Image (cartoon, rainbow, N blue to C red):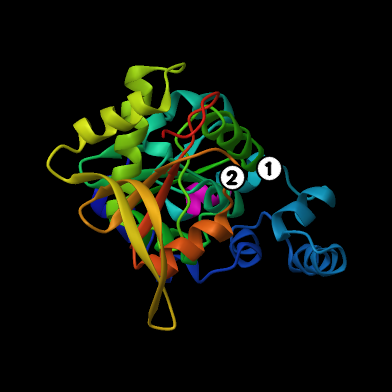
Amino acid sequence: MDTMDNRKRHTGASAYRQKLGEMLRSINLLTQEQVERALLLQKEQGTKFGDAVIRLGFLTKDDINWALSTQLNIPYIPPLELRNAIDPASVLLLPYEFARKHVVLAISMVLNALNIAIADPLNASAIEDIRRITDKEINVSVSDEAAILDMIEAFYNDIPALVTGPQERGIASQIKSGIHDVIKDIGPGFETVVYKNAVCRAFEGRTTKNVNMPLHYRDAEVGSYLIDILIDGSIGVLFSDSSIDEDHIQSVVKMSGLKELILVKVPGHPPAE
């Protein structure tokens, strides 16, 4: 495995300016004619460049992953090894929709560095967003796209604590991970109030229960919204069912002045009274 300093260098902006086609041509895996044909197919079918290369039969997925790993000097995690590399608590550091959109998994933590597996390590903007979201240094590995997507569905579907919030940052990710640990430790099947009390215990000294947050519209107070738990005076935790969608969560955050609103869903039980 690379040292942290080496990994940080590999994720710098200069390493990602080179396009995949240019990289593959520079190491003689593709000719210029093949690059141009793949670019044309990419444009015609609206697909990714790598997928176009594979469809044309020029290279396999393994060829491309090997090239990315070798040229960027980052580890490659084979699909069969990916599951064993994942720490479930780390997965929650990234929102589900973000993980699916960018085909990336947060797989483990080492000190203040987050190890990720991503299908496109040339996606510098996504890696920078991960650094911003988690407030951690990022160690990049490349893995197969289909394998990452399969693991995203497997791990996120197994996590009862789901988080929604338009401005997610490092502290919210840490709280989210802490809530996940609470529910994992207790196990499924209890009434919501049990999980609610346990979360308060886990964040003891930082929480207030049952807070009516004033709602404002055009500088006027128009009502209030009951938050089950308020952490650090600015991050709300709401135990509810799946009827609450992301747009509603965003509206509550905007009108209440909360930094974040974490939605916790406990399968099989209604919200706490």
**Does 180 lie within the magenta span?**
no
Q: Is residue 238 visible?
A: yes
| Circle 1 residues within 10 Å: few <14, some 14–19, many ≥20 | some
Quadrant location, the C terminus: top left
Q: Is residue 136 visible?
A: no
Q: Which residue is mark 2?
A: 65
Residue nearer the viewer, 116 or 248: 248
Residue nearer the viewer, 230 or 211: 211
Q: Amino acid at mark 1?
A: Lys
Q: Is residue 114 above or below residue 246?
A: above
Q: Which mark is residue 89?
A: none
| Rendering quarter of residue 228 | top left
Magenta range:
67-71
Residues under numbered marks 1 and 2 in contact, where contact means CB atoms less than 8 Å apart: yes
Callout 2: SS = helix
Residue in the picture at 65% in, 44% down: 63
Q: Amino acid at mark 2?
A: Asn
Q: Which mark is residue 61?
A: 1
**Left or right: 162, with 229 as reference point:** right
Residue in the picture at 42% in, 28% down: 85
**Left or right: 269, with 3 as reference point:** right
Quadrant location, the N terminus: top left
Residue nearer the viewer, 92 or 43: 92
Residue 123's x, y, as percent?
A: 52, 61
- Mark-to-mark CA distance, 1 and 2: 6 Å
Secondary structure mainly formed by the magenta segment: helix
